[in-house]
Image: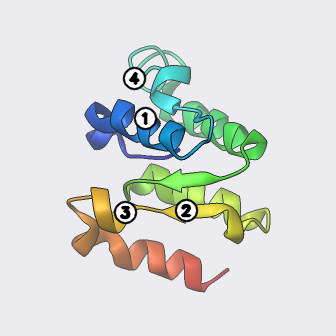
């Protein structure tokens, strides 16, 4: 599951949605808590690399919001030929989707 830090307060809701659909979510905000990882010693770059490694072991990527970080994760998924594994919920949950959707569409159209 992928959502921007600005939506971290909704991560549990997204996690529950994934469970309700019969899947086992890997919630990056639980696996790599912000204060300890992105905001801590490893920093943003290393944390995003670890998030991409987590994507490699997941069957699907459920996208709930668009940000520079989630776009990097989507690109990582696409680079591995896994377009079919992307589930996009940004139009439902991301309040900023109207201003950021073009970025996601650009990445998806180039794959």
Badge number at residue 39:
4
- Most extreme residue toward the bottom is 109
Q: Residues within 10 Å of mark 3 (few under 14, many from 20)?
A: many
Question: Would you say the residues marked 1 and 4 are in contact, meaning their CB atoms lie under 8 Å apart?
Answer: no
Of callouts 3 and 4, the N-terminal one: 4
Q: Residues within 10 Å of mark 2 (few under 14, many from 20)?
A: few
- Check disc 4 and report its element: helix, strand or loop: loop
Q: Nearer the viewer, mark 3 or mark 1?
A: 1
Rounded to the nearest whole Å, what is the CA distance between mark 2 and mark 1?
A: 15 Å
Above/below status of 49 relative to 87: above
Q: Nearer the viewer, mark 2 or mark 1?
A: 1
Colour scheme used in the picture?
Answer: rainbow
Left or right placement of residue 56 versus residue 48 in this view: right
Left or right placement of residue 40 versus residue 7 in this view: right
Rounded to the nearest whole Å, what is the CA distance between mark 3 and mark 2?
A: 9 Å
Name the residue that disc number 1 marks: 16
What is the x, y in percent for residue 50? 65, 33
Name the residue that disc number 2 marks: 87
- Check disc 2 and report its element: helix, strand or loop: strand
Of callouts 2 and 4, the N-terminal one: 4
Rounded to the nearest whole Å, what is the CA distance between mark 2 and mark 4?
A: 27 Å
Rounded to the nearest whole Å, what is the CA distance between mark 1 and mark 4?
A: 25 Å
The residue at the point 49 percent across, 81 percent down is: 106
Rounded to the nearest whole Å, what is the CA distance between mark 3 and mark 4?
A: 25 Å
Q: Nearer the viewer, residue 17 or 44?
A: 17
Of callouts 3 and 1, the N-terminal one: 1
């Amino acid at each position: 599951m992928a959502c921007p830090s600005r939506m971290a307060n909704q991560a549990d809701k997204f996690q529950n949605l994934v469970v309700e659909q019969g899947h086992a979510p890997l919630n990056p905000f639980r696996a790599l808590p912000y204060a300890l990882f992105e905001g801590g010693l490893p920093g943003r770059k290393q944390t995003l690399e670890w998030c991409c490694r987590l994507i490699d072991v997941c069957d699907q990527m459920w996208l709930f919001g668009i940000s520079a970080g989630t776009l990097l994760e989507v690109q990582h998924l696409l680079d591995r030929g896994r377009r079919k594994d992307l589930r996009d919920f940004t139009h439902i949950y991301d309040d900023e989707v109207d201003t950021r959707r073009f970025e996601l569409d650009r990445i998806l159209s180039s794959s």
